[in-house]
Image (cartoon, rainbow, N blue to C red):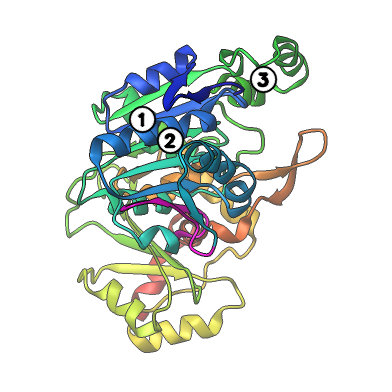
Amino acid sequence: MSNLYSLTDNKLSCLLHPGQTMAHESTRRFVFIIAGVQSGKTSYLPIWLDREMRERGDGDYLAVTATYDILKLKFLPELQNYFCHMFGWKYSASEKVIYKGKTRIICRSADAEGGLESATAKGVLFDECGQDSVRVNAWEAILRRLSLSQGRVLAGTTPYNLGWLKSEIFDRWRNGDNDIQVIQFKSTMNPAFPVAEYERARATLPSWKFEMFYNGNFSRPAGMIYEDFTQNHIVPAFDISAAWPRYMGVDFGAVHTSKVWLAQDPNSKLYYLYRESLEGNKTTQEHVNGVKQYNENNLLAWGGAKSETQQRWDWQAAGQYVAEPRISDVESGINRVIALLKEKRLFVFDTCKGIIDEFGRYARELDASGQATEKIKDKATYHRLDALRYVASGIINDYDISKLVSFV
């Protein structure tokens, strides 16, 4: 936003529009501006952080955005313009840190989650947190960095999907979470945004895209694969009887091995996804020991692509039999999961945040005309949903799972 702030005779003047003012006046711990493009989200963030640092004092603060490219091209210049050019702070390019005295603003990108684990922060800016590349892991890492100080967060983004931003932030706020404040406004809340451009977008874009990108409202994007997954499929976690049958799906990987656990209520025949895991850099034995620690002796497991026979052998040698999924075709496996969702036979514990996030982002690539193609967008990154697809191929009714009992 142009002319948002200026410094005259060491006096800062800010001209905030009503949406920015609402964020500035909020006393909630987690403030999320979910608004249209070019509506003044990013340009306001340094003003909030400046006030936060004045109130909370010296220390480390985080400035996080979705990707390194956005950090370099958009977010970092905004921070430098405010802190360095106006107030004389210094910038270390090698460390990506803006600093003055004993206070540092550590600039990081959410797609390099390891960088979020390196600091204890007193406050956080989170720019473009709703982008497809930002996973719930990044949000959880930020919360860990703030745990000692119980610091605040100001986030700004346009909605891009129905992942963690909706399930962990928007839905919780709407359900009365007093720690969260969501502020939504249109692109035209920015006085500099051309009304003609807003009307052009309204006339030419699909309604879902216009609502998300220009009004800041969540809508179901084209190409969503699990469009039948809704808030009604998410249930509060509860204690599961030890007598319930239990099933596990495994997606093998050296860096990302994912496991999801399902249990079935013998009376209602409903399935509950009650546990998830995404781990890397572990031996097969360590992964198996992680499964065995729960002492679920009635556990049946399926996992891996058809070609991953050696991985299944390794797991069996380590003490956990993992059967080859009956269905190797990806689309057929997806259809099995869709059937469970449509028939209201599969529910997910609200503690399984990773797979809920994946459900909200799993989509097909769109062609130039905005129509869904057969190709799954960023397919290799949905490890938990792959594990679910594997186990779903085993629990569907027309498969006699008793054949596996002798192997367990």
Secondary structure under tag 3 reads helix
Q: Earlier in the sequence, mark 2 or mark 1?
A: 1
Residue position for label 1? 31
Q: Are marks 2 and 1 in contact (CB under 8 Å)?
A: yes
Q: Which mark is residue 155?
A: 2
Using the numbered discs, state the Cα–Cα distance from disc 1 to disc 3 in whole angstroms.
27 Å
Crowding at dot 3, Cα within 10 Å, few <14 / some 14-19 / many 20+, comes out as some
In the rendered image, which quarter contains the N terminus? top right
Looking at the image, which residue sits at the far right?
368
What residue is rendered at 53% in x and 65% in y? Answer: 94
Secondary structure under tag 2 reads strand
Q: Quarter-wise, where is residue 404 in the image? A: bottom left
Looking at the image, which residue sits at the far bottom?
317
Secondary structure under tag 1 reads strand
Tag 2: residue type?
Ala
Q: Is 148 or 295 nearer to us in this picture?
A: 148
What residue is rendered at 41% in x and 72% in y? Answer: 403
Residue position for label 3? 207
Q: Are marks 2 and 3 in contact (CB under 8 Å)?
A: no
The image shows residue 31 at horizontal and vertical percentages of 36, 30
What residue is rendered at 82% in x and 38% in y? Answer: 368
183 vs 264, left or right, is right
**Residue 115 appears in view:** yes
Look at the image and give the residue range highlighted in magenta.
94-113
Using the numbered discs, state the Cα–Cα distance from disc 2 to disc 1 in whole angstroms.
6 Å
Tag 1: residue type?
Val
Query: Relative to residue 191, is residue 126 depicted above or below?
Result: below
